[in-house]
Image (cartoon, helix red, strand yellow):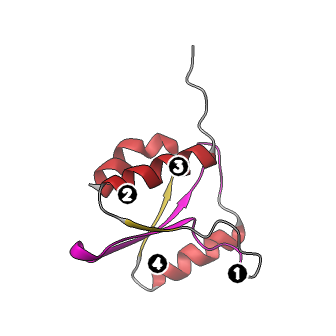
């Protein structure tokens, strides 16, 4: 029987748990009607290693909205680390958070 697809909500829960367990600080704007649309789901920060990641989380079939693409490109243009993570990226995500 194939694995049940992981929702974006469940994927976010997993990523946040992994990050927290590995010493990352986590910023998530759960609901902000006054913010500019498209801001990444998570900002992960690990001060002791001077790392900061901007992460958009998607289900395996999820696609970026145009306003998300604009934000991610803008952050990349500032030489910041920007990622789009899907559940099929699990091994890569875990390695990056370690």
Tell me, yes or no, whether the two marked residues, 2 and 3, touch with CB atoms within 8 Å.
no
Q: Categorize mark 2 by other alpha carbons within 10 Å: few (<14), some (14-19), many (20+).
A: some
Q: Name the spot of residue 11 as percent of width and height, x first.
A: 54, 46
Crowding at dot 3, Cα within 10 Å, few <14 / some 14-19 / many 20+, comes out as: few
Assess whether residue 6 is covered by the magenta stretch: no
Q: Quarter of the image containing the N terminus?
A: top right
Q: Are marks 3 and 4 in contact (CB under 8 Å)?
A: no
- Badge 1 marks a residue whose secondary structure is loop
Give the CA separation, mark 4 to mark 2. 24 Å
| Image position of 23 with respect to 33: above or below | above
Circle nearer the N terminus (4, 2): 2
Measure how far apart labels 2 and 3 are at the Cα level: 11 Å
Residue on which disc 4 sits:
76
Residue at image point 46% right, 55% down: 16
* Residue on which disc 1 sits: 35
Count of marks placed on residues: 4
* Range of magenta residues: 35-63
Q: Mark 3 — residue?
A: 13
Label located before the other in sequence (2 or 3): 3
In the picture, measured across the screen, residue 95 lies left or right of residue 32, that is left
Give the label, 1 or 4, closer to the camera: 1
- Locate the C terminus by quadrant: bottom left
Task: Mark 1 or mark 4: name the one nearer the start of the chain.
Answer: 1
Q: Earlier in the sequence, mark 3 or mark 4?
A: 3
Q: Quadrant of residue 48?
A: bottom left
Taking depth in this image into account, of 78 and 39 the one nearest to the observer is 39
The residue that appears at 75% across and 82% down in the rendered structure is 34
Q: How many angstroms separate mark 3 from mark 1 (CA)?
A: 22 Å
**Whole-percent x and y of residue 20?**
37, 57
Q: What residue is at 31 percent from the left and 56 percent from the top?
A: 96
Q: Residue furthest bottom?
A: 78
For disc 2, the marked residue is 20
């Amino acid at each position: 029987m194939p694995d049940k697809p992981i929702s974006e909500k469940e994927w976010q829960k997993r990523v946040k748990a992994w990050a927290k367990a590995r010493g990352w600080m986590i910023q998530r704007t759960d609901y902000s009607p006054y913010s500019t649309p498209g801001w990444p789901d998570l900002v992960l920060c690990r001060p002791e290693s001077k790392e900061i990641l901007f992460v958009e989380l998607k289900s395996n079939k999820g696609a970026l909205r145009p306003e998300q693409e604009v934000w991610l490109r803008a952050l990349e243009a500032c030489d910041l680390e920007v990622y789009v993570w899907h559940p099929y990226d699990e091994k890569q995500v875990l390695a990056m958070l370690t």
